[in-house]
Amino acid sequence: MNFEKDFSPQGKCRVVQCQMSERSLEHRQRDIYETHKHRAYAVAYYMVGNEIEAEEVTQDTFVRAFRQAEEPDGRCVDCSLVDELRQRMPLDEQAAPAEAVPGQTLGDRNVKRTELEEALKDLPPNERIVFLLRDVEGYDADRVAALLEIPRQQVERTLFSARIRMRTALAAMNRPAAAA
């Protein structure tokens, strides 16, 4: 073995370059995590209703996403999140569609965030995930359909039913007392 040849300046540069690329991959992965963690946690939290379990879902989502791709994109993270949620709850079970109640309205009432969160908890899991992805996260119907692996028409029907259930639940909540 030629000691000088093995530890030549070129060899050192290669080792340093390799370490630099590993660091930059780590930084790129950290950026991916930072970019998507808040959305993944928010959806997980509203789906499971518990901070600790939402943290577990988020962690497992990123473990799954980074196993699938060295640098997963948003779609990969979303698919991993849906897969994690499917393991914990029946996202594929269809509830009977909600029917609108004639004359039921929220009127001029301002709805509080806590009331929205309570109404959201009462949605069936399949309606909750569609509502969160479509109305809260702003995904278009085609993206939601692709993520959940269901037809676009089913996304639209499920969203319609979820909105009716949300409106019904919010209208049923006690109205604030009149000011004295």
Image (cartoon, rainbow, N blue to C red):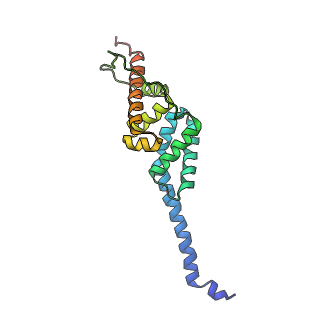
Residue 154 drawn above or below residue 39: above
Q: Residue 178: x and y, percent?
A: 35, 12
Q: Quadrant of the N terminus?
A: bottom right
Of residue 124 and residue 56, the one placed in the foreground of this image is 124
**Horizontally, is 111 left or right of 12 in the view?**
left
**Horizontally, is 6 left or right of 83 in the view?**
right
Residue located at (53% from left, 65% from top): 23
Residue located at (39% from left, 37% from top): 134
Hey, which residue is sitting farthest right in the picture?
1
Of residue 27 and residue 168, the one placed in the foreground of this image is 168
Residue located at (58% from left, 81% from top): 11
Number of marks? 0
Q: Residue 54: x and y, percent?
A: 55, 38
Residue 168 drawn above or below residue 56: above
Q: Residue 132: x and y, percent?
A: 43, 36
Of residue 82 and residue 157, the one placed in the foreground of this image is 157
Hey, which residue is sitting farthest left in the picture?
108
Residue 125 drawn above or below residue 176: below
Q: Can residue 52 be seen at all in this image of the molecule?
A: no
